[in-house]
Image (tube, rainbow, N blue to C red):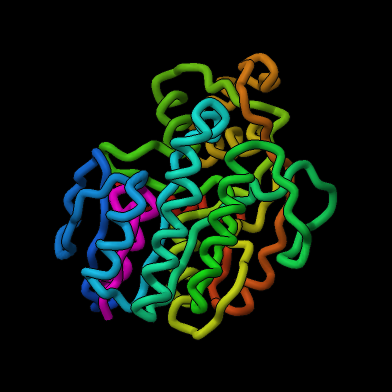
């Protein structure tokens, strides 16, 4: 099968490229400024704000599967520049969905836990979204756009982590591990909570759903719900670093424009339908340690 990965030069997108190549697919991926080379796949430059270019690319390549990982990586950027953020995080998916519908392709769209705000209890796919920042609103618009393609899977994920290649945005684990290895303080927000998601679980789960005939929304998150301080201390312990370097701060100190979500998503539906175990932070860190090089 031919697969098109939109945003394929990022950490998540490149994992999709590699996994689909390993499965024997023909893979095309897009990149913006980071023209990372992925052997065996065809790289195509793409401006994610260019709506018509996305439609033309999908129609020209005619993939059986479109995986849309396009997103601006900064939550705060969306509050500061909502027009560009809308083009990148919402309109780009609409363009992909329109083209996927036209050629009969399946669409996998990567969304976010930020479609929920600050909520108590365990949230399922049946709960009503209530975003509290521009990033969440725009990704929710992206979800609605994805539904233009009848054959779609929407994956709400949270703080995807794993090893990164040079040129890719470093994940929370990589950033703070490198700081601690240099003997530097790792300042982390004690009032930010997440369901961190290991990329090596997210990608196979998404691929399983893409090939299963399933459609709809899934909470594609890891099996831990914890704050950033707990998470960072676990990183220190697993990699033998000094836990005292982890310095808790309150996010108010950072004076950031975007409000952060605090929501615990249930991942039972994706585990059941994909057959993939979504590991805890502890389990994932052990795997990262084994696969570091």
Query: Is 224 displayed left or right of 18 in the figure?
Result: right
**Residue 292 in sight in this render:** no
Q: Nearer the viewer, residue 7 or 59?
A: 59
Residue 270 falls inside the magenta stretch = no
The quadrant holding residue 234 is top right
**Residue 263 in sight in this render:** yes
At a point 25% along the width and 62% down the height, the residue shown is 57
Q: Residue placed farthest to the right in the image?
A: 120
**Where is residue 11 drawn, in percent x and y?**
36, 48
Relative height, residue 15 to residue 210 (above, below): above
At a point 46% along the width and 17% down the height, the residue shown is 184
Relative height, residue 286 to residue 244 (above, below): below
Which quadrant is home to the N terminus?
Answer: bottom left
Q: Nearer the viewer, residue 192 or 146?
A: 146
The quadrant holding residue 23 is bottom left
Magenta segment range?
1-22
Relative height, residue 245 to residue 279 (above, below): above
The quadrant holding residue 63 is bottom left
Q: Nearer the viewer, residue 196 or 93?
A: 93
At a point 19% along the width and 44% down the height, the residue shown is 35
**Where is residue 21 drawn, in percent x and y?**
25, 70
The count of marks equals 0
At a point 65% along the width and 58% down the height, the residue shown is 223
**Where is residue 153 drawn, in percent x and y?**
53, 71
**Where is residue 200 drawn, in percent x and y?**
44, 60
Query: Is 67 displayed left or right of 121 in the figure?
Result: left
Residue 4 falls inside the magenta stretch = yes
């Amino acid at each position: 099968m031919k697969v098109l990965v939109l945003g394929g030069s990022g950490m998540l997108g490149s994992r999709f490229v590699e996994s689909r190549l390993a499965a024997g697919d023909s893979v095309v991926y897009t990149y913006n400024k980071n023209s990372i080379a992925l052997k065996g796949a065809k790289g195509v430059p793409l401006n994610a704000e260019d709506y018509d270019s996305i439609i033309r690319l999908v129609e020209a390549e005619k993939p059986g599967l479109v995986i849309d990982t396009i997103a601006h990586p900064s939550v705060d950027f969306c509050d500061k520049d909502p027009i560009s953020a809308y083009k990148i995080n919402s309109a780009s998916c609409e363009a992909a969905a329109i083209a996927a519908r036209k050629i009969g392709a399946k669409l996998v769209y990567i969304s976010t836990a930020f479609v929920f705000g600050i909520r108590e209890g365990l949230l399922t796919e049946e709960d009503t979204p209530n975003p509290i920042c521009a990033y969440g609103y725009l990704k929710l618009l992206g979800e609605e756009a994805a539904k233009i393609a009848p054959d779609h899977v929407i994956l709400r994920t949270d703080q995807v982590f794993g090893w990164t290649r040079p040129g890719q945005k470093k994940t929370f684990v990589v950033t703070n591990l490198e700081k601690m290895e240099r003997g530097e303080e790792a300042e982390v927000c004690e009032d930010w909570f997440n369901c961190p998601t290991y990329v090596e679980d997210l990608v196979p789960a998404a691929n399983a759903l893409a090939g299963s005939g399933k459609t709809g929304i899934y909470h594609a998150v890891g099996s831990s719900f914890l704050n950033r301080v707990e998470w960072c201390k676990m990183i220190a312990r697993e990699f033998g670093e000094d836990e005292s370097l982890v310095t808790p701060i309150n996010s108010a100190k950072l004076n950031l424009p975007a409000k952060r979500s605090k929501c615990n998503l249930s991942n039972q539906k994706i585990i059941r339908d994909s057959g993939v175990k979504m590991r805890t932070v502890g389990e994932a860190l052990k795997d990262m340690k084994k696969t570091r090089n």
